[in-house]
Image: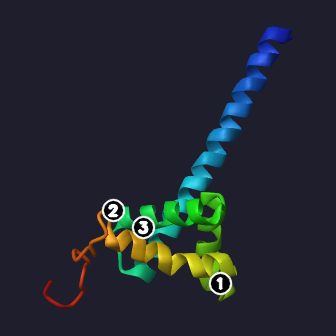
Amino acid sequence: MIGHDEQDRVNKLQEEVDQLRQALMSHALVDQAIGVVITVGGLRSEQGWAVLKHMSQHTNIKLREVARCLVEWPARGRLPEVIRQALPVAVEHVRAGSDGRRDEREVRCGRPG
């Protein structure tokens, strides 16, 4: 028979496992959303992450919710208006870089850079 202390430990470990599972699912969703952003915006992967963060911070929407909307976009055929408006602004912000100059290191597939 499990004592009270052992049961508390089992409960805490189960809670931790549940949290880790949720974090893993959220991470996969964010990775997929980065793929959508870099495809749509013609960006590098680190820029895709920056776009997601910018959109989340400037729309006051949790990052995983922004990611979910972006991942569901192709199947739904639409984005929520706030995210639709924030996406090009965030892409341009990230392309411009922190010093305001446009980043010219974009990948140009099929054409010499």
User: Quick one: label 2 or label 1, which is nearer the N terminus?
Assistant: 1
Q: Quadrant of residue 43?
A: bottom left
Q: Is 86 located above or below residue 109 in the figure?
A: above
> What residue is rendered at 33% in x and 62% in y?
98
Residue 75, numbered circle: 1
Is label 3 or label 1 in front? 3
Q: In the rendered view, does 49 fall on the left or right side of 113?
A: right
What sort of colour scheme is used for the picture?
Answer: rainbow
Q: Is residue 91 visible?
A: yes
Q: In the rendered view, does 46 fall on the left or right side of 52?
A: left
Image coordinates for residue 44, horizontal then vertical, percent: 33, 70
Q: From the image, which quarter does the C terminus lie in?
A: bottom left
Q: Given the image, on which type of amino acid does mark 3 rest? A: Gly
> What residue is rendered at 73% in x and 31% in y?
14
Residue 98, numbered circle: 2
Image coordinates for residue 51, horizontal then vertical, percent: 46, 67
Q: CA distance from mark 3 to mark 1?
A: 20 Å
Is label 2 or label 1 in front? 2
User: Quick one: label 3 or label 1, which is nearer the N terminus?
Assistant: 3
Q: Is 92 located above or below residue 16 in the figure?
A: below
Q: Is residue 32 visible?
A: no
Q: Which residue is mark 3?
A: 48
Q: Label 2's element?
A: loop
Q: Given the image, on which type of amino acid does mark 1 rest? A: Ala
Residue 47, numbered circle: none
> How busy is the neighbourhood of tag 3: few (under 14 within 10 Å), some, or many (20 plus)?
many
Q: Given the image, on which type of amino acid does mark 2 rest? A: Ser
